[in-house]
Amino acid sequence: MTDGGPGGFDLGRLLAERGAERYELHARHLNHQLPRMLHTIGFDKVYERAEGAYFWDAEGNDYLDMLAGFGVMGIGRHHPVVRKALHDVLDARLADLTRFDCQPLPGLLAEKLLGHSPHLDRVFFGNSGTEAVETALKFARYATGKPRVLYCDHAFHGLTTGSLSVNGERGFRDGFAPLLPDTPIALGDLDALRRELKRGDVAALVVEPIQGKGVHAAPPGFLYEAQELLHRHKALLIADEVQTGLGRTGDFYAYQHEDGVEPDLVCVAKALSGGYVPVGATLGKDWIFRKVYSSMDRVLVHSASFGSNAQAMAAGLAVLSVMEDEEIVAGARRTGDLLRERLTALVDRYELLYEVRGRGLMIGIEFGRPSSLKLRSRWTMLQAARKGLFAQMVVVPLLQKHRILTQVSGDHLEVIKLIPPLIIGEAEVDRFVTAFTEVMDDAHSGGGLMWDFGRTLVKQAVANR
């Protein structure tokens, strides 16, 4: 054991000595396009610390996080309850991952999760959202004895090969064929679902109750009607709640917004981690698990080397405790309603602002073609170079001028997605709406740095063709 002195590993010293090399190290050893992209759009910041819904740079400037690590930081960064739970579990020196015993923490976390889905019975713990989806795909195929899974256009279910097969975004799929023989339908298209089910080979439909790309909700009644059709054809409904689950949409799960919807399998991850230890979970009905694990010979037919590890389970238990104690779900619904109402009130004010939609603290802001000639010509210039550039033009000044981190909701989309930590309140809503209003005022003035940056983006887009 080392005390971190001379010759030992000292994390603080390593970061002090090499931390300034962060962008060079990524460019040299990791995905070289990431630092290139960050430099291009001016997102190459150096954040020194984070807490709750904020980052701070070396000069002490605060940055409001409206991205939450793509939804991972549901209860904010470095929540003291989760930190304490992780310290406690490390100090306990548990006999973890022996593989031939049953530790209490996985059972306790499964029990707490299932308490929010009383129609479900069992849980498989993996390490990520895509792994949760992979598990659901395998279980659905095995339990039904059918090979094909339906998914929705523009869906995002992960990037490993199985989940990529039900990913509805072509940009992620290109170049990775052949994938599994799964079939897309339009979100909300019950007629297409009926046609595919009549072929008799469909194991399941996997669906995000609200799609992350573009923030499009399933039409009212679709999930329930789809569930009824699927069950009539002995197929399953899989709800991908990796991003929408754990309070994000103002309900514990987004599917709970619609009465009578009881998915056969539910995938969760992201916020369950507390932002510390990767974890994914697939919840399902007892009969599905009993089919997959049908005998002692099949006890390890589906497993994960780091699944159910003590640190992840402790983080998950702490997150659920915080959600209950701090009434996170109700807070997300209340704050989300306020933010959406404040933004919706701006739609009639700005011709470049097309629509505000979403539920809870998952909000999409869509921009559209303006009516005035001067703005329309500039909009057309951006669209000709690459769709999605105007949304990027909004994201950049929000960070550069107002120190607010947001994201464009998908490639070639004129949509900004807001998925902040669920702990934000009225002060953060005021800060965002004030900044967004100023950015939109600048965009509609027809000049200034915003459109200068737009020309830079156009040149970059043309150069990348």
Image: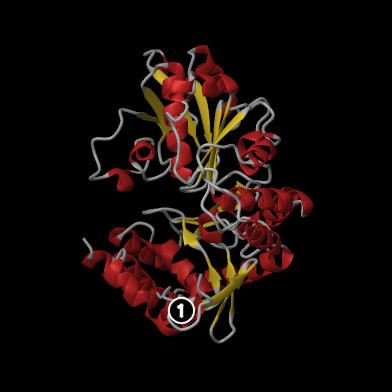
Q: Position of residue 172 (x, y in %)?
A: 32, 47
Frontmost residue, 314 versus 242: 314
Residue that numbered label 1 is attached to: 15
Q: Secondary structure at mark 1?
A: helix
Q: Which colour scheme appears in the figure?
A: secondary structure
Q: Position of residue 222 (x, y in %)?
A: 56, 28
Name the residue at 68% across, 36% down: 111
Work out whether 181 lies above or below 34.
above
Name the residue at 48% across, 71% down: 443
> Which quadrant of the structure image shows residue 458?
bottom left
Q: Position of residue 302 (x, y in %)?
A: 44, 32
- Quadrant (top left, top right, bottom left, bottom right) of the C terminus: bottom left
Frontmost residue, 166 versus 25: 25
Q: Count of labels shown? A: 1
> Which quadrant of the structure image shows residue 411?
bottom left
Q: Is residue 227 left or right of residue 41?
A: right
Work out whether 400 lies above or below 91.
below
Residue at the extreme front of the image, as rendered: 1
Q: Residues within 10 Å of mark 1 (few under 14, many from 20)?
A: few
Q: Position of residue 424 (x, y in %)?
A: 68, 62
Q: Is residue 406 visible?
A: yes
Q: Is residue 411 left or right of residue 273?
A: left
Q: Is residue 455 visible?
A: no
> Which quadrant of the structure image shows residue 108?
top right
Name the residue at 64% across, 62% down: 87
Q: Amino acid at mark 1?
A: Leu
